[in-house]
Image: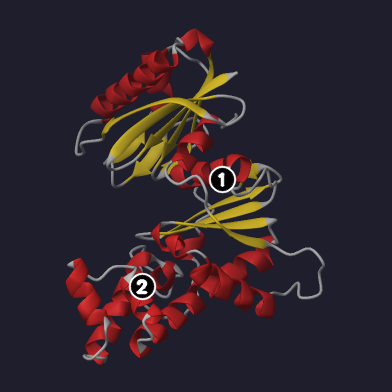
Amino acid sequence: MLRIGIDLGGTNIVAGVVNDEYEIIAKAKTPTAIPRTPEEIFDDIAMVCKQAMAEAGVTISDIYSVGLGTPGTANAEGVIEYANNLGFDHVPAKEMLIERLGCDKVYIENDANCAALGEAYAGCGNGAKDFVAVTLGTGVGSGIIVDGKIVSGTNRAGGECGHSVIVVDGEPCTCGRKGCWEAYASATALINQTKAAMEKYPDSVMHDLAKEEGKVSGRTAFDAMRRGDIAGIKVVDTYIKYVACGLINLVNIFQPEVICIGGGICNEGETLLRPLRRYIESERYSVYSKIQSKIVRAELGNDAGLIGAAILEG
């Protein structure tokens, strides 16, 4: 059985034909080129789907279903109610895809949820039925799988773990609240923490590293830490504590089989994961349980959302 998965992003539209083994057998992409009308964007979505099918040597009659992962919120009727970075407001995505592709089995879901589903079934989750994916990127994205199904609440806007507060009246968050996990644990937050430490420590090696790279990045403090730089060590230690705080909350709430860490910061590998596991082990509520959540690195990269979209069900 073949399915089409679509990853609709602010930069690119990617579509792929996916088989029952969760393998992408053909893929095509095109720039999203926003701002544009929804009609123009969905014309291009249909185009890349057809290109992927042509690459795979199949037609729409060979496709069981089509799934779309989108930023923002999509309701049960397949309408993208709001996606601010795309300029979408109540866009009838399901209807538009059925009209353009001729497949009546079309499913629409939030992109972070699709990525979680993809990792749970085809990536680091190894088929885990209870699974949480956390992406440490510009923000803190998350997707929750319970008993093999996406958890998104009664209005399909749930699962936003990045906007749970870990510091009351803390740093302002882009969502309007203060003290959100995202404001402390995202790559953006790490960069801000690094810049603040560089101002405090003018002799830190982080200044040289930033100059070499041409900017302060999520790697700057980690690279300085590896050189024994005191300021870099302090930034990394504090950042990891913030990440761990949110993860411990997720463990205590969901007790998932696996928590997957994705985003650019996960490229630090065990440098990041090892101390996170230590914090979780020492502070989790389930301290005496023989079964504990595994903390692992994401495996599928940019393909996670596409594969997850392909395996969406009604």
Instruction: Give the crowd class for mark 2: few <14, some 14-19, many >=20 residues within 10 Å.
Output: many
Viewport quadrant of the C terminus: top right
Instruction: From the viewer's perspective, tell me whether residue 202 is left or right of residue 18.
Output: left
Image coordinates for residue 153, horizontal then vertical, percent: 58, 49
Q: Which quarter of the image is occupied by the N terminus?
A: top right
Q: Is residue 106 above or below residue 209?
A: above
Number of marks present in the image shown: 2
Counting from the top left corner in percent of width and height, residue 177 is at 39, 69
Label 1's element? helix
* Mark 1 crowd level (few <14, some 14–19, many ≥20, 10 Å Cα): many
Circle 1: residue type? Glu
Mark 1 or 2 closer to N-term?
Answer: 1
Residue 120 in which image quadrant: top right
Indicate the amino acid at tag 2.
Leu
| Residue 172 visible in the picture | no
Identity of the residue drawn at 29% across and 85% down? 197
Q: CA distance from mark 1 to mark 2?
A: 25 Å
Seen from the viewer's position, the closer of residues 197 and 37 is: 197
Check disc 1 and report the residue beneath it: 119
Q: Which mark is residue 190?
A: 2
Image coordinates of residue 141 in percent, x first then y, are 45, 56
In-front residue for pair 21/39: 21
- The answer to whether residue 184 is above or below residue 99 is below
**Image check: 15 left or right of 19?**
left
- Determine if residue 223 is in view: yes
Q: x%, y% of residue 104?
A: 51, 16
